[in-house]
Image: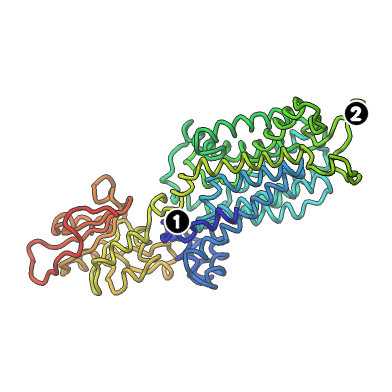
């Protein structure tokens, strides 16, 4: 996981959400505290954490290192849960399957909280098993509470764990301990829920999930390529059917993994049908951890069945629970210490159980090979929704000190906030107060009358805009932004354009006032980088 996380980490550009993390974490703690009262409360704790991280060194690589660390910890915890509930080779396979999953690798390289949330969720899951065994629940409540403050939708782990406990038919004492810890988590999360509900307009762009949405999430969980997807899905079904039932009071691997995969995404998708949509796949990244556990359990079951058919194999009688059937039909635990092997042939070659584990490792090694083109493409900044560094480079080629700039809509100002050197010395025609002063993400827009006054004597205007705004498919809500867009259409003509993804950098000039105009710095026809 560390290898995949560090591979291509310095891809040379941030996309919009990462740039928000970068510029907000660069503010003071009081400024962050003021911001989350009006916007982005769900990420408040993460911004404070990143404020401390970027205080060491503020660049794109350091921005993403906490996510790499979170993914590494998650892979290790997946392996530990698999080893604890099944056997070591199941844990090993599951941890490696998580590490080579493209979705895990994608968010391991993003300067957002989702990889850290996944680590917290798996830590809480491991502490759930400890709570059932020992009756100690304070650690579970503490870890899950902090994780929910990193992102509030981690609270959907609670119903997943409730289903796991119900499937295990645990005793009332366990339910009481878990219920107290869960109540404490909900109580500490209540202030964030109240504040974030008032900020629901931030996710107004979301659409209701459909059947295609669920199918797409399944492909991300079980493999992007066709071959990997169907093999992993088949093994997951085998692991689910073979390991769901257990003794009363005993939590099984499938009993934990299946609710983790199904419940959080399912609840969020169903809730999005009857209320404003809230579902995005990254919000439930942590549910991915259940998929490799099911696949590894299915692979272990298939290995056990194949072993029974192996001629003369001692390991052929290994059962999925980690117990070996003796010659008399009774079962004996194979996970305890064994007497040292004698000098016979079995001492000179590894047991076939280890051969099965090694064969599983070889098969897992094929997964990243089959998906290598996707993994390589994912390291390209162009694979993100936008590339602010490319936009800044396009702007820097033409902008000069004293030039006027208009951002349509205001969130495109994020490019300047992330890469200020490209816009150094320019004048923002629509900015009234900067974001760190006004307690907003991108700053406060000036009134329409001020925007018209500032543009009255301007000969050239550089516009950084969403392409849908320039094409007329969408009109900004802010009056100042609408006033600036109206003036551009009535009094200016396009002199050059550079396009990068969904964002364009355009040079506008007044056609009736040629005196004093410099030659356009961008080509007259659209150019794509």
Residue at (23, 66) in percent of width and height: 398
The quadrant of the rendering that contains the C terminus is: bottom left
Q: Position of residue 407 (x, y in %)?
A: 30, 60
Label 1 secondary element = helix
Q: CA distance from mark 1 to mark 2?
A: 58 Å
In the image, is 134 to the left or to the right of 391? right
Tag count in the figure?
A: 2
Q: Report whether residue 338 is seen.
A: no
Residue 493: image quadrant is: bottom left
In the image, is 240 to the left or to the right of 172? left
Residue, disc 1? 17
Q: Nearer the viewer, residue 408 or 2?
A: 2
Q: Position of residue 350 (x, y in %)?
A: 78, 42
Label 2 secondary element = loop
Residue, disc 2? 330
Q: Position of residue 291 (x, y in %)?
A: 62, 39
Mark 1 Cα-neighbour bin, 10 Å: few <14, some 14–19, many ≥20: some
Q: Position of residue 280 (x, y in %)?
A: 49, 44
Q: Nearer the viewer, residue 355 or 94?
A: 355
Mark 2 Cα-neighbour bin, 10 Å: few <14, some 14–19, many ≥20: few
Q: Nearer the viewer, residue 36 or 138?
A: 138
Q: Nearer the viewer, residue 347 or 10?
A: 347
Q: Is residue 19 above or below residue 339?
A: below
In the image, is 46 to the left or to the right of 187? left
Residue at (58, 65) in percent of width and height: 49
The nearer-to-camera label among 1 and 2 is 2
Instruction: Give the label on residue 433, or none.
Output: none
């Amino acid at each position: 996981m560390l290898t995949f996380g560090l591979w291509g980490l310095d891809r040379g550009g941030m996309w919009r959400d990462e740039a928000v993390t970068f510029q907000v974490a660069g503010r003071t703690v009081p400024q962050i505290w003021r911001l989350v009262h009006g916007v982005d409360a769900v990420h408040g704790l993460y911004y404070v954490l990143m404020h401390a991280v970027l205080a060491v060194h503020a660049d794109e690589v350091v921005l993403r290192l906490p996510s790499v660390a979170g993914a590494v910890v998650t892979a290790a915890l997946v392996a530990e849960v698999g080893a604890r509930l099944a056997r070591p080779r199941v844990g090993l396979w599951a941890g490696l399957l998580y590490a080579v999953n493209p979705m895990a690798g994608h968010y391991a390289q993003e300067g957002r909280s989702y990889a850290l949330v996944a680590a917290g969720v798996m830590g809480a899951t491991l502490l759930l098993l400890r709570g059932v065994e020992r009756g100690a629940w304070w650690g579970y409540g503490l870890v899950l509470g902090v994780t929910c403050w990193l992102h509030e939708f981690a609270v959907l782990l609670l119903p997943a764990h409730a289903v796991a406990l119900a499937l295990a038919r645990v005793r009332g004492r366990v339910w009481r301990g878990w219920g107290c810890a869960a109540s404490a988590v909900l109580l500490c999360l209540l202030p964030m829920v109240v504040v974030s509900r008032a900020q629901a307009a931030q996710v107004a762009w979301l659409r209701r999930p459909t059947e295609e949405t669920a199918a797409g999430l399944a492909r991300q969980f079980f493999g992007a390529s066709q071959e990997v997807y169907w093999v992993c899905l088949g093994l997951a079904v085998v692991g689910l059917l073979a390991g769901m039932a257990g003794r009363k009071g005993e939590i099984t691997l499938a009993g934990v993994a299946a609710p983790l995969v199904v419940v959080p995404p399912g609840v969020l998708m169903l809730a999005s049908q009857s209320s404003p949509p809230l579902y995005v796949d990254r919000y439930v990244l942590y549910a991915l951890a259940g998929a490799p556990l099911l696949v590894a359990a299915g692979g272990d079951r298939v290995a056990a069945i194949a072993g029974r058919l192996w001629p003369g194999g001692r390991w052929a009688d290994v059962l999925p629970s980690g117990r070996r059937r003796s010659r008399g039909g009774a079962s004996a635990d194979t996970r305890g210490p064994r007497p040292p092997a004698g000098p016979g042939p079995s001492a000179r070659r590894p047991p076939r159980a280890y051969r099965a584990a090694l064969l599983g490792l070889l098969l897992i090694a094929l997964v990243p090979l089959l998906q290598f083109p996707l993994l390589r493409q994912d390291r390209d900044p162009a694979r993100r929704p936008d590339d602010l560094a490319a936009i800044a480079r396009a702007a820097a080629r033409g902008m000069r000190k004293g030039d006027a700039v208009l951002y349509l809509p205001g969130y495109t100002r994020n490019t300047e906030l992330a890469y200020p050197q490209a816009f150094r010395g320019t004048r923002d025609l629509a900015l009234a107060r900067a974001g760190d002063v006004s307690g907003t993400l991108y700053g406060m827009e000036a009134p329409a009358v001020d925007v018209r006054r500032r543009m009255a004597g301007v000969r050239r205007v550089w516009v950084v805009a969403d392409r849908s705004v320039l094409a007329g498919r969408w009109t900004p809500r802010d009056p100042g932004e609408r006033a600036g867009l109206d003036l551009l259409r009535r009094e200016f003509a396009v002199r050059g354009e550079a396009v990068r993804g969904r964002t364009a950098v355009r040079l506008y000039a007044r056609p009736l006032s040629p005196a004093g105009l410099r030659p356009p710095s961008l080509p007259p026809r659209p150019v794509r980088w």
